């Protein structure tokens, strides 16, 4: 195994993955109508819905995969439907650590997944609740990871 600094590459991969599991927010960038990136902070479901995403129908397929939950009426949903290329960025500013995960999203219509992710407290954010028409779930499939720690950068192609 290739050694980088003090850590084996496998340890670096595990550290990058651990960062995605511990941060409460994730910055999500998508492309607008003119091709420019737009970034917004969203709940990191890997953290806030870890129970639902660790087992059962909503368990993501593979490392760095996840789901995004948002309002159907938000600007980002039609943009992501049109062009599913997105980048997720997890950041621990206190430890100068970041993980950029590039991939694609697609809308999830599977009721078992939607219901597994949903929590009743979200009714304040989604008018009409899970079946009210304003709750969209997107599946994120990762393609490439760049992990920043200290002064080092590691890249993993998935």
Image (spheres, rainbow, N blue to C red):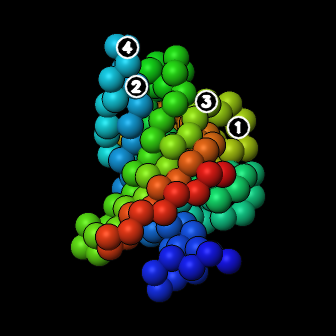
**The image quarter in which residue 143 lies:** top right
Q: Is residue 14 left or right of residue 76?
A: right
* Mark 2 or mark 3: whose residue is earlier in sequence: 2
Residue closest to the far bottom:
6
* Disc number lying in front (4 or 3): 4
Residue at x 56%, y 40% (from the top left corner) = 103
* Mark 1 or mark 2: whose residue is earlier in sequence: 2
Q: State the residue position of label 4.
A: 33
* Mark 1 or mark 4: whose residue is earlier in sequence: 4
- Of residues 60 and 152, the one nearer the viewer is 152
Residue closest to the far left:
94
Q: Is residue 39 left or right of residue 109?
A: left
Q: State the residue position of label 1.
A: 111
Residue at x 51%, y 43% (from the top left corner) = 102
Mark 3 to mark 1 CA distance (whole Å): 12 Å
* Disc number lying in front (2 or 3): 2
Q: State the residue position of label 2.
A: 31
In contact (CB < 8 Å): disc 1 and disc 2: no
In contact (CB < 8 Å): disc 4 and disc 3: no
Q: State the residue position of label 3.
A: 107
In contact (CB < 8 Å): disc 2 and disc 4: no
């Amino acid at each position: 195994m290739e050694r980088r600094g003090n850590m084996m590459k496998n340890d670096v991969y595990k550290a990058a993955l651990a960062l995605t599991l511990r941060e409460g927010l994730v910055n999500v960038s998508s492309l607008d109508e003119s091709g420019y990136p737009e970034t917004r902070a969203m709940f990191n479901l890997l953290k806030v819905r870890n129970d639902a995403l660790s087992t059962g129908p909503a368990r993501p397929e593979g490392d760095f995969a996840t789901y995004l939950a948002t309002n159907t009426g938000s600007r980002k949903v039609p943009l992501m439907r049109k062009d599913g290329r997105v980048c997720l960025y997890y950041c621990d500013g206190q430890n100068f650590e970041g993980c950029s995960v590039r991939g694609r999203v697609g809308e999830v219509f599977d009721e078992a997944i939607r219901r597994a992710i949903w929590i009743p407290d979200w009714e304040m954010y989604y008018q009409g609740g899970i079946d009210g028409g304003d709750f969209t779930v997107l599946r994120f499939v990762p393609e490439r990871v760049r992990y920043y720690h200290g002064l080092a950068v590691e890249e993993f192609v998935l």
